[in-house]
Image: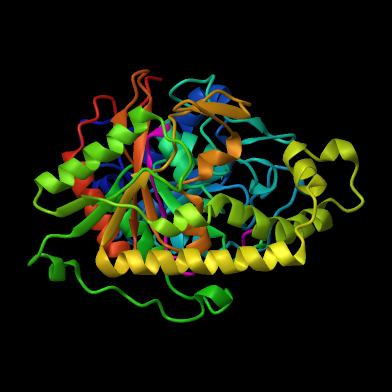
Amino acid sequence: MKTNPIYYQDATSLAQLIRDREISPVEVMETHLERINSLNPSINAIVTISDQAINQAKLAEKKVLNGEKLGVFHGVPFTVKDSIDTSNLLTQRGSPIFKGHIPERDAISVARMKASGAILIGKTNLPEFSYWIESDNLLSGRTNNPWDLSLTPGGSSGGESAAVAAGLSPIGLGTDLAISVRGPAAQTGIVSLKATHGSIPMTGIWPRAPRRFWHVGPMARSIRDLSLAFSILSGPDGQDGFASSQIQKEKSLRNFESRPLRIGWMTGPGFGPVDPEVAKIVEAAASTLKQMGHSVHKVEIPVLEKDFALDVFNHIHVMEMKEAFRQATKGRSDNEIYKMAKTMLSLPNTSMKDYIKAEQAAERIRDGFAEYFFQYDVLLTHVLPIPAYKHGEESFVINGETVDATYLQGATVPLNITGLPGISMRFGTSSSGLPISVQVIGSWHAEPTILHVASLLETAGSVSELHPDL
């Protein structure tokens, strides 16, 4: 890690270097601000920079010099998606409707990062209202993928993924309704965690509906960063009802040392079409784990073929999110509303009959995964069915089948419906030199297991170019 420049160190390394007084928080912050000044005009990942970042770094430096107790991320810069509240710093949600909005309080996730010693450096771009798989809006424009500026870094946490990938920030927070921390991570070659629903409170994040599908999670450069971030972000806050009970902590991984992990892998059926190049990377990751001595099998989850998760999700979430958008745009002019909010508001209402059928299908999907995880410890899949793609594409030909852009969520949305935890991590490279990632999925509250498996893959992975050439 020490061969990397400061801006490509992971957050854990930076924290250790600061703790050991090998580098100062001020130098770390200045390096990242210089990087932002140099690259952000072309990438447009960061939309607001904190004017307190340097002052906070100076205070962090004094604590180091005074020998005070330091948090796990002491002095490390972090960024936050612009749908997540930050006190005294703009939170504009990708919309002119919220231009100039400054929250009074930090979201719980932001407050916990700050309590760990991390220093907020800025806010990152997103689609309007956090709703789409590309990060573009009327207020702050379009974010470009650091690997190729003609490509999108995804959405809705695309600004965050681009910032981490480009070395503008070592770690940050995104949100995920159906794909939004995992897809962007896959498109830019970083790592991200969508934890078990309710593990990390959503307090201070908009939109709230449908909150049973929404998640907030860390995006970073290493699995150890995700593990450390999860340890400080998780736990009830007394405000988010989904996070009101104590998390059921999984038993120590040492329980697995006496036996191989039971790992299944699949790229379908039930997820929609997948590019063969992507499928090969998933199979390669499975083969790697098998070579390590784990029990690995190709599997199917029959319920996903009966109840296509993306259709189930669409029937459920539209009615609830549509009302949130209607309230936000009430009385506003048409030129303040971008295409995705307009699309949502134009969608036909789901009938009560279809809504109930979808809710029942969601329960069947949850039962199907419960059955699977009664037999296996981990499920390995793709994140996206294709590598990063051009801005504005609305349909794709994948393995000979034409699908619309929503199908890119086929392998990620089942985890939002069920609340299962999943990690997105790079494990290969496409023929055109773009990152290809795999998704490591576990049972409810099995974050220690999937973090362990992801770390095994990270160690074994052979990725020739870890960072974009900028």
385, above or below 56, in the image: above
Identify which residue, 84 or 348, lies in the foreground. Answer: 348
Identify which residue, 33 or 379, lies in the foreground. Answer: 379
* Residue 101 belongs to the span the image colors magenta: no
Residue 119, x across and y down, in percent: 46, 51
Is 4 situated left or right of 80 in this image? left
Identify which residue, 271 or 216, lies in the foreground. Answer: 271
Is 258 situated left or right of 322 in this image? left
Residue 80, x across and y down, in percent: 53, 49
Identify which residue, 258 or 287, lies in the foreground. Answer: 287
63, above or below 11, in the image: below
Is 399 situated left or right of 417 in this image? left
Q: Which residues are magenta?
A: 188-206
Q: Report which quarter residue 232 is drawn in.
A: bottom left
Q: What residue is at 64 percent from the left and 53 percent from the top?
A: 314
Q: What residue is at 49 percent from the left and 23 percent from the top?
A: 38
Q: Is residue 89 visible?
A: yes
Q: Main secondary structure of the magenta part?
A: loop
Q: What residue is at 48 percent from the left and 47 percent from the top?
A: 181
Number of marks in the rendered image: 0
Q: Is residue 68 visible?
A: no
Residue 355, x across and y down, in percent: 69, 64
Q: What residue is at 61 percent from the left and 67 percent from the top?
A: 359
Q: Report which quarter residue 390 is drawn in.
A: top right
